[in-house]
Image (cartoon, helix red, strand yellow):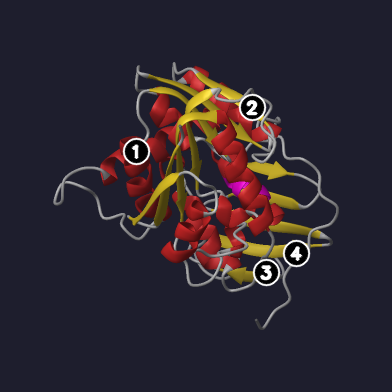
């Protein structure tokens, strides 16, 4: 890494629905502005770097990011663009900075807060479905963030049967929204972030869907034993330590009446921009399954899967 990363200060919670000025987002760490595509030299004085989609500068102790993404490109592939162009090369670092600039890109594209996020969710889910089309009909998104996650969502939908579902570590909650579209499912999403769960509730209501939410640590779920038919743990374990992960699986087994469905990415190195702190292979998943004393199966499909049968 040839340049020092810009370092965040003390964390403050992100309000994804807070009012913003036209075309920009500001908080105590970052400013994100939407502008017309640059024509020639670097935009603004003192840029750190300019990429295909972003111009990064430092103004005092604040990161200033300019982008030229139109609303029709506002989807979860923005995460991949940020990771590839700014975080992988080391221009920016840290999960909190990633979340703030990501929020800033979404909020600076559309003035109305809820409409901005509904645009983001609507575009993302539409492009997930495009990835599900038969070969030849699908658009070429295989190596994008959405293209990598679309088969994971499809496989989770196959493994999660009808009934009450609790999804742990839901983040934006794309899978809970897809589950809620099926009339046979009653869906609860959960995450540590109250702001993200509030956003998911608002977007679900705007889409005419019922998604209940819980703000909690996945290792301490405030529901009774056997509360859900199925508990899904999709791309969560790579974000937590081994001890925390075992506690998450223990809680999932306590809450599930019938099945726990676990998925993890298979990576050579943890993707730090996304908050990954460890990697998995099928052997490690199998050892985790064997350690909990329930019937389990392990397989690979766009990552590793562990299915635990309860009862």
Which residue is label 4 attached to?
58
Mark 3 → mark 2, Cα distance in angstroms: 41 Å
Whole-percent x, y for residue 20 in the image: 69, 34
Q: Residue at x 67, y 41 (%)?
A: 219
Which residue, given by chain and number where applicable, does mark 1 sit on? 159
Sequence-first tag of 3 and 4: 3
Q: Position of residue 226 (x, y in %)?
A: 55, 25
Q: Quadrant of the N terminus?
A: bottom right
Instruction: State which tag comes first along the sequence, 2 or 4.
Output: 4
| CA separation in Å, label 4 and label 1 | 46 Å
Residues in magenta, as a range = 99-105
Label 3 close to label 1 by CB (< 8 Å) = no
Q: Nearer the viewer, mark 4 or mark 1?
A: 1
Residue 214, numbered label: 2
Q: Is residue 157 left or right of residue 193?
A: left
Dot 2 or dot 1, earlier in sequence: 1
Other-residue count near label 2 (Cα within 10 Å), few / some / many at <14 / 14–19 / ≥20 = many
Mark 4 vs 1: CB contact within 8 A: no
Label disc, if present, on residue 47 of the rendered structure? 3
Q: Quadrant of residue 117?
A: top right
Numbered circle sitting on residue 242: none
Mark-to-mark CA distance, 3 and 4: 7 Å
Query: In the structure shown, which secondary structural element does the residue marked by tag 2 occupy?
Result: strand
Distance between mark 2 and mark 1 Cα atoms: 22 Å
Q: Main secondary structure of the magenta part?
A: helix
49 up-or-down from 295: above or below: below
């Amino acid at each position: 890494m040839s340049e020092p990363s810009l370092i965040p200060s003390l964390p403050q919670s992100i309000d994804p629905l807070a009012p913003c000025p036209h075309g920009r987002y500001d908080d105590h760490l970052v400013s994100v502005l939407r502008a017309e595509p640059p024509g020639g030299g670097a935009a603004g004085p003192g840029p750190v770097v300019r990429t295909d989609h972003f111009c990064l500068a430092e103004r005092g102790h604040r990161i200033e990011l300019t982008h030229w993404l139109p609303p029709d490109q506002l989807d979860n592939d923005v995460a991949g663009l940020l990771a590839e162009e700014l975080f992988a090369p080391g221009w920016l670092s840290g999960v909190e900075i990633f979340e703030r600039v990501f929020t800033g890109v979404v909020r600076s594209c559309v003035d109305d807060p809820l409409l901005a996020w509904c645009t983001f969710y609507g575009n993302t889910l539409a492009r997930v479905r495009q990835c599900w089309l038969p070969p030849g009909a699908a658009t070429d998104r295989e190596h994008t963030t959405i293209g990598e996650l679309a088969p994971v969502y499809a496989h989770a939908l196959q493994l999660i049967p009808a009934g009450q579902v609790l999804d742990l570590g839901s983040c934006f909650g794309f899978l809970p929204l897809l589950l809620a579209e099926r009339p046979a499912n009653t869906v609860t999403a959960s995450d540590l972030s109250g702001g993200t769960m509030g956003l998911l509730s608002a977007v679900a209501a705007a889409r005419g869907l019922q998604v209940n939410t819980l703000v909690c640590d996945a290792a301490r779920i405030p529901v009774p034993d056997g509360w859900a038919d199925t508990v899904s743990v999709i791309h969560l374990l790579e974000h937590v330590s081994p001890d925390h992960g075992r506690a998450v699986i223990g809680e999932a087994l306590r809450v599930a009446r019938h099945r726990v469905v676990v998925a993890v990415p298979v990576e050579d190195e943890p993707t730090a921009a996304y908050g990954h702190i460890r990697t998995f292979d099928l052997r490690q998943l199998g050892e985790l399954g064997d350690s909990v004393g329930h019937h389990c199966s392990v397989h690979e499909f766009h990552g590793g899967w562990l299915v635990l049968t309860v009862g």
